[in-house]
Image (cartoon, coloured by chain):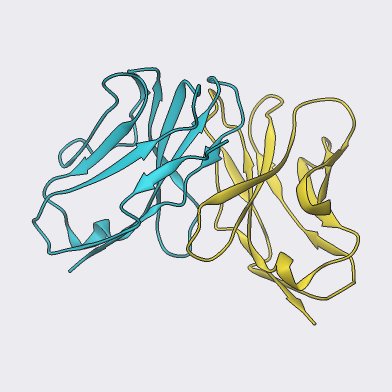
Amino acid sequence: AQSVAQPEDQVNVAEGNPLTVKCTYSVSGNPYLFWYVQYPNRGLQFLLKYITGDNLVKGSYGFEAEFNKSQTSFHLKKPSALVSDSALYFCAPDGGYNKLIFGAGTRLAVHP
Amino acid sequence: EAGVVQSPRYKIIEKKQPVAFWCNPISGHNTLYWYLQNLGQGPELLIRYENEEAVDDSQLPKDRFSAERLKGVDSTLKIQPAELGDSAVYLCASSLDSEGTQYFGPGTRLLVL
């Protein structure tokens, strides 16, 4: 079965420090990979996606993600966290025909 | 450019009552998706439309859920009758085509009492 794993329910980081939100997936083929962010009482906002090419993908709000094919991972990163980055983050591989597979997400808490 | 529009934003109903949610996708987006998001979980796809055709409704509980996208633009998702377990957030998303990035609306939060 196709799946995605975000091993940390919550990530805590101090403002100004780098952050990483981890994601591994189990999907056949070479899927497109996405990161979305969800703020309270709002829908999901698209951050970035990997299709092919450079393993480091840059996205919105200073976020980037690193693709590792051998480890089937797609970790989200940001060099310097902001308090306003606190939200719920979802990694979502495309399981085929643009059917995104979502896990339970990782809650990011950035402390002043 | 306007994003995906959903209404209502919140709905409270009693069990066994019907309820409907409306979604207007981003202009020009041919593909429309309805997702269900339970508390503490990620979204799960219910149905996907390409224009007016439902191309994937395998996860839609067809005994009580129905959806339509008659003119290939806006869409309605209906539950009849609603059950307590249907309390969740219903998200609509759209993409330019069947391979494009999905953009989500704010969702409709349903509470069934």
x and y percentages locating residue A44 in the rendered image: 56, 50
Which residue occupies the foreground of this view, B99 or B93? B93
Which residue occupies the foreground of this view, B1 or A110? B1
Residue B71 visible (yes or no)? yes
- Up the image or down, A62 lies above or below A26; here it is below
* Residue A88 figure quarter: bottom right
Q: Residue at x 43, y 29 (%)?
A: B32
B70 horizontally vs A62: left or right? left
Q: Residue at x 34, y 30 (%)?
A: B74
Placement of the N terminus of chain B among the 4 image quadrants: top right
**Chain B shade:** cyan
- Up the image or down, B55 lies above or below B36; here it is above
x and y percentages locating residue B94 in the rendered image: 49, 32
**Chain A shade:** yellow
Q: Residue at x 55, y 58 (%)?
A: A104
Placement of the C terminus of chain B among the 4 image quadrants: bottom left
Q: How many marks?
A: 0
B56 horizontally vs A91: left or right? left
x and y percentages locating residue A64 in the rendered image: 83, 47
